[in-house]
Amino acid sequence: MNEQSPIRTETARQIGPEAPAPTRRRSRTGTWLILLLLLAGGGAAGYRYYLAPKSATETAADGAPARGKGARGRPGDMAQAVGVATVSAGEIPVVLSGLGTVTPLATVTIQSQISGYLMEIGFREGQTVKKGDFLAQIDPRIYEAQLAQYQGQLARDQALLQNSKLDLARFQRLSLQDSISKQNVDTQAALVKQNEGTVAIDQAQVDQQKLNIAYTRIVSPVEGRVGLRQIDQGNYVTAASTNIVVVTQLHPISVVFTLPEDDVARVMRRLRSGAKLTVTAYDRGDANVLATGTLDTVDNQIDTTTGTVKLRALFDNKDESLFPNQFVNAKLTVDIVRDTPIIPTAAILRGTPGAYVYLLDGDDKVVVRPITVGEAEGARTAVTKGLAVGDRVVVDGTDRLRDGAKVRVTEGGKGQPAPPGEPAAPGQAAPAADATATTSTPAAGTPPENPPQKRERRRERPAAQ
């Protein structure tokens, strides 16, 4: 037992209070490493914060300060680049728009009026024909035979009628001599009337067969364009039941369109005054003019289900730009407003005061001016109140303006460029060469410099490691 006590005493010394010393040293090293990392991160953040205002306040070629989050001063205190337009006097048409359909004045379905075999087709599909042009031929032989038969009956009955008339004249002379009874004279007179009726029937049958023979040759009743053939040569056609082809009149052609019932009074007032109103037909996209014509008539009643009235306009359509059943946008010019202030439609804004514009006050300031809008035509709008000829209004860069804001008029009417790093707002132009920027464009053949953010990251990386 006494021999083992030194060993136990030595083991107790090794696991005594002096054993945790290496652990404490590792703990102090980790704490210092964390403090160094925190200091490095703080220094990097401060360095980035120091560079941000510097890059944001770089100036462009024109000397104007760049606008950004790090720029000094408020953005509203800087002069905004805007495009302006001058209010001019002119005339603008009063146009009423409606949806219309191209409607031919005549669409004729060609049918056979008699029965028989189709012997010949005299047209080509899509051909333009005139009134009276040959279209088709029906077999006429059966009708020619019947005509000969009826003509023979007519000749026989005409001979009987002639004989009965001679007998009647003879009986009348004998009656004057009291050589024949009056009854025989009356009977002969009735026979003459009977034969006259028979001859009339025969003549009608002859005329009918001549008409049937004329029906065997089918001609175009109108001038127009022939459609697709609906039956082939050699088929048997029946009267009023077989369609051969459709002929559509194209010159002139009409457009039937609708207008709201509120516009009827204005249109009728112009028509009663004898005015000749112009109608312009546009394509489905309302971008291209197809044809120009005149208003022909207005329907006699308003459709109660839609609250609209139908109108018909006529077009010469010499170039066949209008096709039957084509959808068009019809624009009726009712009147023309003359000597009125006109501004670009893009300058008109709408808000709490209603319609308003930013009016240029002097050369470097804008004010809000409420206006009353009149007739509009595409990109032009008439102003009935609020502006005078010669005033200048902002048409580009209005999204960042306010009443009394300072502005800078750009050449060519270019709007305020978008801030660097942000997409251009609607209605604004892209930054031009002379616009404010935070970076410069390198010369040809020179590699571009790294952006400021990339340079900062490269400087931060060694500190972070």
Image (cartoon, helix red, strand yellow):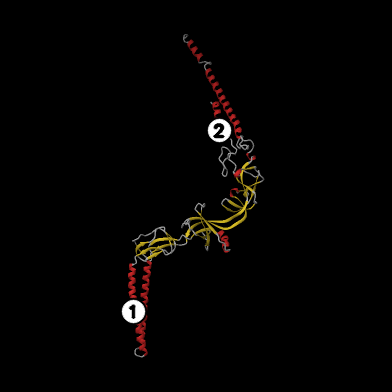
At label 2, counting other C-alpha atoms closer than 10 Å, the crowd grade (few under 14, some 14-19, many 20 or more) is few
Q: Nearer the viewer, residue 256 or 155?
A: 155
Q: Element type at marker 1?
A: helix
Location of residue 252 in the rendering, given as x and y in whole percent from the top left corner: 48, 61
The amino acid type found where label 1 is placed reads: Ala
Q: Is residue 434 above or below residue 212?
A: above
Tell me where residue 223 sits by quadrant.
bottom left
Q: Nearer the viewer, residue 353 or 321?
A: 321
The disc placed on residue 297 is none
Lateral position of residue 276 relative to residue 187, left or right:
right
The disc placed on residue 451 is 2
What residue would you read off at disc 1?
Answer: 159
Q: Is residue 50 above or below residue 254?
A: above
Residue sticking out furthest to the bottom: 178
Residue sticking out furthest to the front: 444
Kindly identify the residue that appears in the image at 49 percent across and 10 percent down: 6
The amino acid type found where label 2 is placed reads: Pro
Residue 187 visible within the image: no
**CA separation in Å, label 2 and label 1:** 120 Å
Residue sticking out furthest to the top: 3
Lateral position of residue 155 relative to residue 325, left or right:
left
Q: Nearer the viewer, residue 42 or 71?
A: 71
Location of residue 100 in the rendering, given as x and y in whole percent from the top left corner: 50, 57
Q: Nearer the viewer, residue 317 or 269?
A: 317
Q: How many numbered marks does the figure carry?
A: 2
Kindly identify the residue that appears in the image at 36 percent across and 84 percent down: 168
